[in-house]
Structures are given as C-alpha cells and as structure tokens.
Image: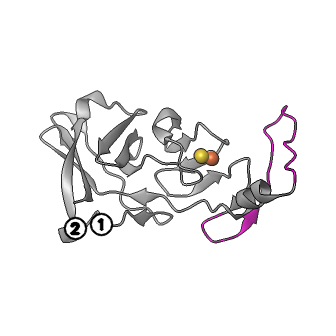
C-alpha cells in the first residue's frame, strides 16, 4: 500500500509482543507522530505525549510503534541503532527484533527473559568480563526481567503517521 507514493506497510502485532495497555478501544486516542516523508526506511523517531514516549520505526517490514523504553532497563531505544528490523539498545548490548517482538540478544547484565528463564551475564568479544560482586546489585540484575515489547496501533493518514495511545 502507498500513501502519496510512500510505502505505508505496517507491522502487525507480532507473536512475540503484546498490545500496549490502553492503546485500543474506547481507552485510546490517536496522536500525530509527524510526516511519513521524514521517516525514511531504516530510521526512527521519538514521539512524546504527556509522560509517554513512543518509538516509531520504519523497518523493511513497515512501520512499527512501541514504547521508547528498552524492555530491559528502560533506556531510550530511539538513540540506539536500527539495522533492518533489529534495534540495538544504547545500554547493555540488548538487541530486539521489532518485526517479530523477539529478543535477538540478551543484555550483558543477563537476567530473566519474558518467560522467566535466567540468562547469565556475558561480555562482548575483546572486553574483560564484568565481575559482579555478590550483593543487592547482582541480585537486582539477576531478577530484572526483559519484558515483551509493547506495541501501539499505527497508521498513515494523508501522509502523516498516527499512533493510538492511552487517552
Ligand atoms: S537498558 Fe537496554 S539492554 Fe539494558
């Protein structure tokens, strides 16, 4: 599908993700997320509404809108790097597939995945392993769960991107 000659494919709610609470039905309202023309494939945009920050990304599979908060420890994914469908978080090396909702790479801090399975800490090649002294900090890392990505309905109307968010 195209809108003013620009590809307007939308990524449907992927199996690995969940609908953002309040973003559908009578509890939702549409907000303007700027012109589609300014969001070339491979780029991302942060849209703020009240205290909600939404990331709109233009992937090879189409547009997608999720919380602009890493599902690990809430860093803004909009300042990470988008490679195809995969966004890399600016902290802890976590990588997430926006088109499937799946975790591609767990954060270096390890912790729990969305199903509650534990993953150990790890270090990128060439970097010294980070030794976690036992204590509350290590316990917090171990118990931090990487949540499922939260998706917002997104569409293109007359060349502008609209995202449904909680009213
Ligand atoms: S905050 Fe994103 S990987 Fe940790």
Residue found 87% across the figure and 35% down from its top: 128
Q: Which is the main secondary structure of the residues drawn in magenta? A: loop
Picture residue at 39% right of the left edge, 41% below the top: 57
Provide the residue span drawn in magenta: 113-133
22 or 160, which lies in front? 22
Please report the residue visible at 29 percent of the width from the left and 57 percent of the height from the top. Answer: 153
On the picture, is 45 further left or further right than 79? left
Front residue (pair 150, 15): 150
Query: Where is residue 131 drawn, in percent x and y?
Result: 87, 46
- Packing grade of label 1 (10 A; few <14, some 14-19, many >=20) is some
Which secondary structure, mark 2?
helix
Is 29 on the left or on the right of 147, as rendered? Answer: left
| Percent of width and height locating residue 118 | 74, 66
For the question of whether residue 66 can be seen, the reply is yes
Looking at the picture, how far across and down is residue 154, in whole percent?
27, 52
User: In this image, 51 relative to 80: left or right?
Assistant: left
Magenta residue check for 90: no
Q: Determine which residue is flagged by label 1.
A: 22
Tag 2 near tag 1, CB within 8 Å: yes
Question: Secondary structure under badge 1?
Answer: loop
The verdict on residue 124 being magenta is yes
Please name whichever residue, 55 or 84, is drawn nearer the observer in this view of the structure.
Answer: 55
Q: Which mark is residue 130?
A: none
Q: Residues within 10 Å of mark 2 (few under 14, many from 20)?
A: few
Question: Which residue position is annotated with label 2?
Answer: 27
State how far apart marks 2 and 1 are (Cα).
Answer: 5 Å
Locate the C terminus and report the quarter of the image it occupies.
bottom left
């Amino acid at each position: 599908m195209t809108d003013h000659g620009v590809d307007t494919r939308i990524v449907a709610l992927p199996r690995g993700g969940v609908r953002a609470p309040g973003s559908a039905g009578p509890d939702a309202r549409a907000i303007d997320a700027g012109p589609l023309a300014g969001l070339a494939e491979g780029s991302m945009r942060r849209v703020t509404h009240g205290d909600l920050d939404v990331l709109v990304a233009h992937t090879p599979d189409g547009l997608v809108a999720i919380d602009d908060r890493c599902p690990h420890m809430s860093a803004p994914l909009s300042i990470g790097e988008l490679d195809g469908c995969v966004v890399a978080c600016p902290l802890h090396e976590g990588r997430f597939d926006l088109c499937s909702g799946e975790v591609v790479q767990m954060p270096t801090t390890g912790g729990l995945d969305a199903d509650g399975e534990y993953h150990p800490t790890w270090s990128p090649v060439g970097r010294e392993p980070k030794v976690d002294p036992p204590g509350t900090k290590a316990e917090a890392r171990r118990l931090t769960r990487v949540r499922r990505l939260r998706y917002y309905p997104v569409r293109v109307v007359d060349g502008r991107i609209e995202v449904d968010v909680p009213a």
